[in-house]
Amino acid sequence: MSNNPINIFLIDDEFPKIPEFTASSIYDVAINSENLYHLAITQTWKGLQPLQQLIKDIVTSQASKDNHIKLTGYTKPTQCLNDIESGFKPDVLIYDWEYGMPNPTESQGWLLDILSNTDAFVFIYSKVRDELPPFLNKKIFDEYAHRFQLFLKGSSTHSIFSSEEFILQFILGKVSDSGKLKIQGFDVEFTSNYYLKKASDILYLERILGKMYLLEEFKKLQFSLNEDTIENLLNDSKGYLYFSEEKGLLISPDEKTLVEKLKPLKELSYSFVAKHYSIYKLEEALEKGTAII
């Protein structure tokens, strides 16, 4: 690991405003982690409690205490861009889109400037998530599509991770391959293992087993994720794929026509597929119906 900390930039215009910070012009420049944490533990965040908690979790993480993470806040994208121009650049950037809505020309331009002048991964973090794809699916963003992801603020509807939990795991995963995860408010011990290399790989496990099943099983496992518990999860699910040795093809049982056409086939358990061909291939076969190995 480099001795240099991972730089996390957070751009949002809704940080609570307090008189002493305003008088000291703290909101007019980069806001350091100490001041962000002060706001997070002393103020009411009026509908932004998930962001408030994300700041607390980043600043109080062991990685931050060990100076492996440096969090910096900005109330305006232009402040951030000024720092980038001067050579202070982020590794991960959390970008509040709401600037200039409903006409997001400026917000779109600032995002493009950030992407083109850094190598950062950008989380576009917005209350109006579902309105944004038309603006982000433009050709000008094509070359950067692998470097940004869109999240709804405060959302935990569609995934085992809330938006903020996923962002936190992504950040911590850049520093360490083990530690405590936050999943639906619970602490889960995670160690990089044969099946899952980084915390965000749990999303593959979620797509394979389903959100509710996985949450229930986590409770039985006393919220510990390692090689043994993951193998047990896969075995207990009783899931399986078919395998065509001749075609080198993993096939979902849902692909009934193909299964009939290629018989006889081997039946392989989820844990066997994950162990011998990877959890990514298992998820691919279930998602697409087949996976070549």
Image: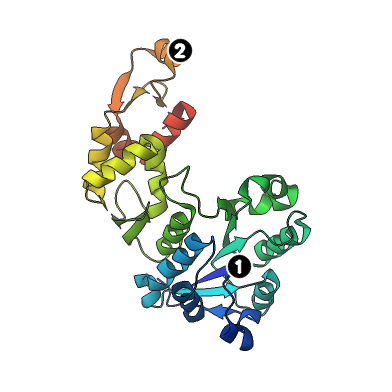
Q: Label 2 sits on what residue type?
A: Thr
Which quarter of the figure is the C terminus placed in?
top left
Return the residue nearer the eye: 211 or 178: 211
Which quarter of the figure is the N terminus placed in?
bottom left
* Drawn side of residue 141 relative to residue 160, left or right: right
Q: Is residue 263 visible?
A: yes
Label 2 sits on residue: 257
Task: Tell me the CA gap for discs 2 and 1.
Answer: 54 Å
Residue 277 position in % (x across, y down):
35, 37
Q: Label 1 sits on what residue type?
A: Glu
Q: In the drawing, what numbered circle is on residue 14? A: 1
* Drawn side of residue 247 relative to residue 180, left or right: right
Earlier sequence position, callout 2 versus callout 1: 1
**In percent of the image, x 67 and y 71: which residue is there?**
76
**In percent of the image, x 72 and y 60: which residue is there?**
107
**In percent of the image, x 61 and y 73: which residue is there?**
74
Q: Tell me the SS state at disc 2.
A: helix
